[in-house]
Image (cartoon, rainbow, N blue to C red):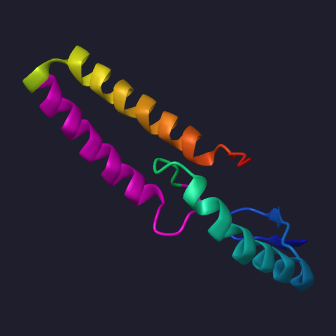
């Protein structure tokens, strides 16, 4: 722990060197395993993601909603998106369920 006095005094808790080495080893080992399992709309603390990417994706998505709403109506757009999400979840369930071969 150390104290920073810029702007206002506050305590900063930082990991020691050994803990940081262990943290990096764990992240380098676990990140390739878990990263593909996260949804695309998760932006925090991920490589090639972050607040700027989240804002750009939100803008792109709202433009898509506006286009579909004017073209097909909001009800049809919502039904289409729910159907796509259902089929993707179903496919993921099938692909991740272990099978027993007799």
Residue at 56% x, 40% y is 94
Rendered residue at 33%/44% (across/down) = 58
The residue located at (83%, 79%) in the rendering is 20
Q: Nearer the viewer, residue 46 or 86?
A: 86
Quarter holding the N terminus? bottom right
Left or right side of 85 for 39 = right
Question: What is the x, y in percent for residue 37?
Answer: 59, 53
Give percent across and percent down for residue 78: 30, 22
**How many numbered discs sit on the rendered protein?**
0
**50 within the magenta span:** yes
* The furthest residue to the top: 75
Q: Is residue 36 magenta?
A: no
Nearer the observer, 74 or 33: 33
Q: Position of residue 55 (x, y in %)?
A: 36, 50
Q: Which residues are magenta?
A: 44-70
Front-most of 17 and 11? 17
Residue 77, compared with residue 41, is above or below; it is above
Q: Main secondary structure of the magenta part?
A: helix
76 vs 68: above or below: above
């Amino acid at each position: 722990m150390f104290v920073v006095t810029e702007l206002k005094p506050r305590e900063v808790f930082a990991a020691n060197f050994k803990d940081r080495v262990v943290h990096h080893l764990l992240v380098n080992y676990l990140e390739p395993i878990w990263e593909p399992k996260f949804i695309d709309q998760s932006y925090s603390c991920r490589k090639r993601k972050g607040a700027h990417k989240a804002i750009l994706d939100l803008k792109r998505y709202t433009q898509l909603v506006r286009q579909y709403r004017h073209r097909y109506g909001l009800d049809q757009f919502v039904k289409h998106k729910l159907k796509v999400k259902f089929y993707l979840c179903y496919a993921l369930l099938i692909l991740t369920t272990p099978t027993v071969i007799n």
